[in-house]
Amino acid sequence: MERPLTQHMKPDGSALDISEYEKTGGYRAVRKALTMAPKEIQEMVRNSNLRGRGGAGFNTGQKWSFVPMGDDAPRPKYLICNADEMEPGTFKDRMLVEKNPHQLIEGMIISAFAIQADIAYVFLRDEYKTAGRRIAGAISEAYRSNYLGKNILGSDYSLDFHLHTSAGRYMCGEETALLNALEGKRATPRAKPPFPQTSGLWGKPTVVNNVETLCNVPHIVKNGVEWYKGLSRSEDGGTKIYGVSGRVKRPGLWELPMGTTVREIFDEHAGGMQDGYKFRCLIPGGASTEFLTGEHFDVKMDFDSVMKAGSRMGTGTMIVLDDTICPVGALYNLELFFARESCGWCTPCREGLPWVVRILKAIEEGHGEPDDLEKLEMHGKFLWLHFTYCALAPGAMEPLRSGLKLFRDEFERHIKEKRCPYENVPAARMNV
Amino acid sequence: MLSDQEKQGIEAELENYEHKRAACVEALKIIQRSRGWVQDDGLHDAALALGMTEEELDGVATFYNLIFRRPVGRHVILICNTISCWIMGYNPVREHLSRRLEIEPGETSADGRFTLLPVPCLGACDHGPAMMIGNELYGDLTPGRIDAILEKYGWESD
Ligand SMILES: Cc1cc2nc3c(=O)[nH]c(=O)nc-3n(C[C@H](O)[C@H](O)[C@H](O)COP(=O)(O)O)c2cc1C
Ligand code: SF4
Ligand code: FES
């Protein structure tokens, strides 16, 4: 099985330096790309069916194709790598930046060239200290070898490259809020349209892509569309970095063919449940996706298949809930996160999420009322797509909506018995 | 007044961005690194250097979880309280920290050494419960492992 993104990573977890990276074939794709027409690279990436790994799964080449090209395109144009990774349960981009920063830089150079960007930023969360140190070092190395800067490798293409470290706020990962954050403003989102591809950073054409998305690009350019599609077991191209956290035997990350089943990831790679714990359900792709249950073990983890199963693949990093965990407590924990991280820009989310949290807290503490479930369902309807300014609130509603259906009896038991049946489980206690 | 070092740091950051205000998060971090937190006068001086109003800069400062507009201890403990860590036992670890340092989340210990702040996911979910102190990340925490970690930062059991 081929693992283009991770196969060269060192077992001791240290980063490949530039000469080690070059020895694995690194930066060869840049040389090839510089001989191609930018539009040709866009086409290639579109045909490879690389879909955005930030969670939404938009075709990457198609996303790029909306950027104005040619001599009269507004300048400067920007390419931004979204390395804000703060979605609870998600830890894949950390590994990609820490263990192979040059792969990301190479992906960014080619992507920037494909849209003829002049300036590139890595938008990194501040807590990723090791990643920050390593990517900064790698950027210097790449400048010294003229993979970055003026007239890259003697071509007439130039690229300025910067690292921006943020200061901790989930909203900064939303792509238009990220643009405001980079401009030194509060990270509230912008209305779309105009889309960032035509009016992004400082009003100029901008593409924002996820770390993992960008890391795929050199391999597509080097090995071609057919090879890339062949890596996958589904319509979406390539491999995927899947992850599992929770009470499994071997929590971790694995690069596997796109479309690997939930069962294979859970059983073979994560090793199944720890002894003494039973599987209850999982959230397939970070906190803002709907629950899947044991019935869904044969679902393929790709964007369309998980959608058909009633959830979203999201970031592809699953969170496993075991039978000692109170589902109401888990939802309280999830919604508390979203309520705290809400940017406050639009009323339904700013006011609605704290209300959801208060209701869940009351139910968990044994003060729930029978009509509380209706109130929660109402929020599930009105904090949904098109009622709020960005996808944070609808994302918050995904686990809530599915949790209300799936754990109806658990909710009712809390309300009827006026207590949490799991109250003696340490993890089930609520956060302050 | 900004110190010379702070001034130079901010000047250097301004070089990195096309517009002054874009350097504001870095400027706030520079002040915080030297003083521990961002006081009103630091905010005022930084706003001047960035060509922003104090209100604009405060709006940005208060948006971020990791810019402190109130005093914090010498070591800020960032403990993840979101889903994977919570499942793996955030509560017992957090309660142990609270008992040892005699502080609740959001508070600073009496000796000014530690502040305890629950934060969202640290991207170490496969090693939950996780926390950070300074640049160090600690994973697979249990209450039993906490004392030895705190001792590295000068905590003494009595
Ligand atoms: C609240 C919120 C937070 C997000 N955080 C991230 C993030 O940390 N990293 C990321 O790549 N995408 C994040 N996204 C998705 C981005 O808005 C965007 O879709 C993505 O960066 C596009 O890259 P892709 O096309 O390569 O997937 C977030 C979205 C929302 C609504
Ligand atoms: S949905 Fe929430 S996070 Fe998004 S703009 Fe509205 S208040 Fe902000
Ligand atoms: S949920 Fe705690 S590190 Fe991710």
Image (cartoon, coloured by chain):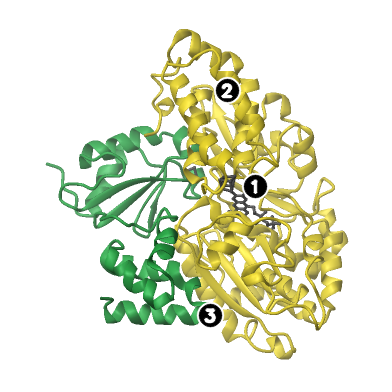
Chain colours: A yellow, B green
What residue is shown with label 3? A140
Mark 2 residue element: helix
Is ligand 1 closer than 8 angstroms to the Cβ of mark 1?
yes
**Quarter occupied by the C terminus of chain A:** top left
Q: At x 61% / y 32%, what residue is drawn?
A: A399
Q: Residue furthest bottom?
A: A154
Find residue A374 and report its horizontal and vertical position in percent. 60, 19
Foreground mark, 2 or 3, reads 2
Q: Nearer the viewer, residue A65 or A5?
A: A65
Tag 2 near tag 1, CB within 8 Å: no
Q: Are discs 2 and 3 both within one chain?
A: yes
Q: Mark 2 sits on what residue?
A: A375
For disc 1, the marked residue is: A315
Instruction: Judge the density around disc 3: few (<14), some (14-19), many (≥20) Cα neighbours within 10 Å.
Output: few
Q: Is residue A412 left or right of residue A146?
A: left
**In the rendered structure, the residue with mark 2 lies on which chain?**
A
Any part of residue A223 in sight: yes
In the picture as drawn, the residue positioned furthest to the top comes out as A416
Q: Which mark is residue A187?
A: none
Q: Residue at x 46, y 8 (%)?
A: A417
Q: Earlier in the sequence, mark 2 or mark 1?
A: 1
Tell whether A343 sits left or right of A231: left
**Is label 1 or label 3 in front?**
1
Nearer-N-terminus badge (2/3): 3
Label 1, secondary structure: give it.
loop
Number of marks in the image? 3
Q: Amino acid at mark 1?
A: Thr
